Image (tube, rainbow, N blue to C red):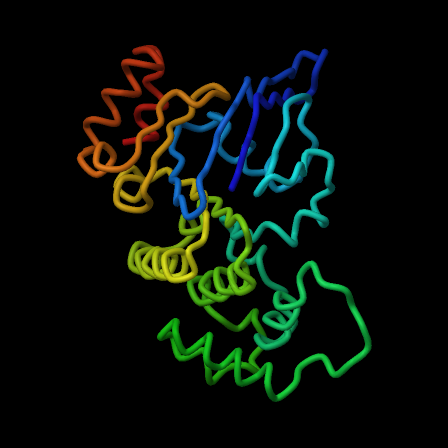
Amino acid sequence: MLEVNNIYKTFNAGTINEKTALNDVSLKLNDGDFVTVIGGNGAGKSTMLNAIAGVFPVDSGSIKINGKDITKLPEHKRAKYIGRVFQDPMLGTAADMLVEENLSIAQRRGKKRYIKWAISSKDRKKFTELLSQLNLGLENRLSSKMGLLSGGQRQAVTLLMASMLNPELLLLDEHTAALDPATAAKVLELTDKIVVENRLTAIMITHNMHDAIKHGNRLIMMNQGKIIFDVSGEEKAKLTKTDLLNKFAEIAGQNQESDRMVLS
């Protein structure tokens, strides 16, 4: 479903601020894989997701989704293949628009535009059914402005918007980091439900080792722009936080103490 082949990305090349963010990264995901990504600050996690999403071009290498080469496609043209949820709940929705208007925009992502009533009664029925699955009472707030919802409610709606067209790839960039623990747990529960029920292929970045181990069928660890550890299946299921910290120390080196603190 996803093939990332030998991609490199350097920012501020040739200057004193030169930073190699991705260093020969290759990654292949099968249909239905749910991969969690963990690593210290500056490890390249978000840069990898941004490269896949098309936020910036890579210096070299290729990116394919379901056999289609999207390496040269701009971000807006990748929208028909990719759904994304950001760390900041405010980024995924339009605060001054109604809940139903946000959902309507998501429903038309990647499609041709034409003149018609923006939201039909059929659309409202569909949105009500979708929102009722969240068990947050939002099915009764279609006409509320998105900005009036709590951060957790907005993130839940954003997750629904990103997945409602069954994208070929769902990108989750620390999408629970800005939420309190109880709300984060609820959003992660919804994430599992949506990914499994819709058989989505997903990548989830997290700083939380417990979440990285608990969720998904595969885990990768990054450090200094490289994938340094890749585990799946039963081997992943047996992992503990101590195992991950020890593996990081073994591969990345004992001098990465600050990143060990972040990971723990």
Q: Quadrant of residue 147?
A: bottom right
Q: Is residue 189 above or below residue 215?
A: below
Q: Residue at x 73, y 42 (%)?
A: 74
Provide residue 30's location: percent of width, then percent of height. 44, 40
* Horizontal side of residue 37 vs 127, given as left or right: left
* Horizontal side of residue 106 vs 206, given as left or right: right
Q: Quadrant of residue 5?
A: top right
* Residue ranking furthest to the front: 67
Number of numbered discs on residues: 0
Q: Is residue 136 above or below residue 246?
A: below
Decide which of 46, 178 is in the foreground and name it.
46
Q: Residue at x 66, y 36 (%)?
A: 69
Q: Residue at x 44, y 28 (%)?
A: 41
* Residue ranking furthest to the bottom: 121
Provide residue 120's location: percent of width, then percent of height. 65, 85
Provide residue 81's location: percent of width, then percent of height. 61, 50
The C terminus is located in which quarter? top left
Q: Is residue 199 above or below residue 24?
A: below
* Horizontal side of residue 89 vs 15, given as left or right: left
Provide residue 56's location: percent of width, then percent of height. 69, 34
Decide which of 191, 69 is in the foreground and name it.
69
Q: Is residue 120 above or below residue 146?
A: below
